[in-house]
């Protein structure tokens, strides 16, 4: 079973007990913690050497401590190569293939702006401000900041 992180709540009943989360950014770390708290066996795969570099500076230490004290198995320096029925085949730091086992894979990689939706709505009101993920994938903190400033511009 393969589920994009943004679709998790639409398909959560299909998520099995052994989960591999691909992507150790903020979204990947948060879904990994959520699944771990639900009692699932979670493995978190990140190709960089650190987790959640995109997290808020005040939130990140708390997030990392929670991951450290949870039962999540973290694989940093692992690059996902392919998804199989047994899990995710990754290349480790030495370039050797390693299988990270799991029967569900949550993909928390490559968030993109939803420009198509913006283009459909751009003429729907006298004034439309483009903020948040419609401009570029980012964090809720950035979207709130942008929304605040867009409201000041009216």
Image (spheres, rainbow, N blue to C red):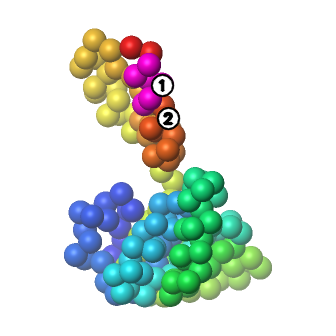
Disc number placed over residue 16 in the picture, else none:
none
Residue occupying image coordinates x 59% and y 75%: 65
Q: Residue at x 56, y 59 (%)?
A: 59
- Asked whether, in this view, residue 92 is left or right of residue 8, the answer is right
* Quarter-of-image position of residue 133: top left
Asked if 149 appears above or below 79 in the picture, the reply is above
Predominant SS along the magenta part: helix
**Which numbered tag is attached to residue 145?**
2
Using a 10 Å C-alpha cutoff, classify the residue at mark 1 as few (fewer than 14 neighbours), some (14 to 19) or many (20 or more): few
**Are dots 2 and 1 in contact, CB under 8 Å?**
yes
- Residue named by callout 1: 149
Q: Position of residue 18 (x, y in %)?
A: 39, 86
The reply to whether residue 129 is visible in this rendering is: yes
The answer to whether residue 134 is left or right of residue 47 is: left
Q: Secondary structure at mark 1?
A: helix
- For image coordinates 35% across by 67% down, the residue present is 3
Residue closest to the eye, 14 or 39: 39
Residue 110: percent from left, percent from top: 51, 54
Give the image location of residue 84, x and y in percent: 45, 80
Kindly indicate the quadrant of the structure image that contains residue 61: bottom right
Count of marks overlaid on the render: 2
Give the residue displayed 39% in from the left and 73% down from the top.
34
99 relative position to 104: left or right: right
Compare residues 107 and 44 and report the one nearer the observer. 44
Specify start and end residues of the magenta stretch as a single range: 147-152
Q: Nearer the viewer, residue 119 or 127?
A: 127
Quadrant of residue 121 within the rendered picture: top left
Q: Describe the element under mark 2 as helix, strand or loop.
A: helix
Nearer to the camera, 74 or 120: 74
Residue that lies at the very extreme toward the right in this rendered image: 94
């Amino acid at each position: 079973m393969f589920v994009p992180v943004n679709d998790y709540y639409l398909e959560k009943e299909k998520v099995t007990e052994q989960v591999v989360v691909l992507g150790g950014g903020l979204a990947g770390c948060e879904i990994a913690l959520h699944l771990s708290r639900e009692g699932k066996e979670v493995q978190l795969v990140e190709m960089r050497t650190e987790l959640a570099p995109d997290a808020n500076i005040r939130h990140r230490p708390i997030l990392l401590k929670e991951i450290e004290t949870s039962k999540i198995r973290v694989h940093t320096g692992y690059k996902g190569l392919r998804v199989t029925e047994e899990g995710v085949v990754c290349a480790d730091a030495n370039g050797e293939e390693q299988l990270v086992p799991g029967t569900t894979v949550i993909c928390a990689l490559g968030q993109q702006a939803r420009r198509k939706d913006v283009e459909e709505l751009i003429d729907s009101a006298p004034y439309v401000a483009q903020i948040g993920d419609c401009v570029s994938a980012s964090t809720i903190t950035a979207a709130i900041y942008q929304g605040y400033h867009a409201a000041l511009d009216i």
